[in-house]
């Protein structure tokens, strides 16, 4: 017959406890049951896609209740850190500083090579 299964709520609480950032499986408190049980159940649910479907259902319910807000922000214009191209560079799409840096690193590499 075997042992009766552990209370799923208790195991789920252990999985939730472990989901805190930086918590390894070995640190799950004993009140949640054996860590192997929590790990096995969590891994099984991950493989079967249970976590994905739970998240989807929670998101749908939260969206229906108005708890999820979608906000899109687009700023037009040139970014301050975007490279500025001259007319001749527009085709190659390589800014002046990049081609100059590449040439300097190639020159330095060639100077350091020694014949065998």
Image: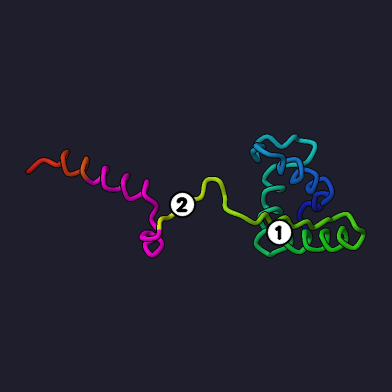
On-image quarter of the C terminus: top left
Depth order, front residue of 79/20: 79
Give the mark nearest the N terminus, 2 or 1: 1
Q: Outermost residue, left direction?
A: 116
On-image quarter of the N terminus: bottom right
Q: Is residue 71 magenta?
A: no
The residue to which callout 2 is attached is 84
> Where residue 20 appears, x then y in whole percent?
72, 40
> Where residue 113 appears, x then y in whole percent?
14, 42
Mark 2 lies on a secondary structure that is loop
Image point (76%, 64%), residue name = 53
Q: Is residue 1 left or right of residue 64?
A: left
Mark 1 lies on a secondary structure that is helix
Q: Residues within 10 Å of mark 2 (few under 14, many from 20)?
A: some
Q: Is residue 33 left or right of residue 96?
A: right
The stretch in magenta equals 87-106
Image point (40%, 56%), residue name = 86
When asked about the image quadrant of residue 16, the answer is top right
Q: Outermost residue, front direction?
A: 87
The residue to which callout 1 is attached is 45
Depth order, front residue of 16/67: 67
């Amino acid at each position: 017959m075997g042992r009766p299964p552990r209370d799923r709520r208790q195991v789920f609480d252990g999985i939730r406890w472990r989901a805190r950032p930086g918590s390894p499986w070995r640190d799950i408190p004993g009140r949640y049951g054996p860590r192997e049980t929590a790990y096995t159940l969590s891994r099984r649910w991950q493989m079967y896609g249970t976590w994905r479907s739970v998240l989807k259902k929670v998101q749908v319910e939260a969206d229906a209740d108005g708890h999820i807000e979608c906000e899109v922000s687009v700023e037009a214009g040139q970014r301050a850190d975007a490279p500025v191209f001259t007319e001749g560079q527009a085709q190659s799409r390589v800014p002046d500083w990049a081609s100059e840096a590449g040439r300097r690193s190639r020159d330095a590499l060639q100077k350091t090579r020694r014949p065998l």
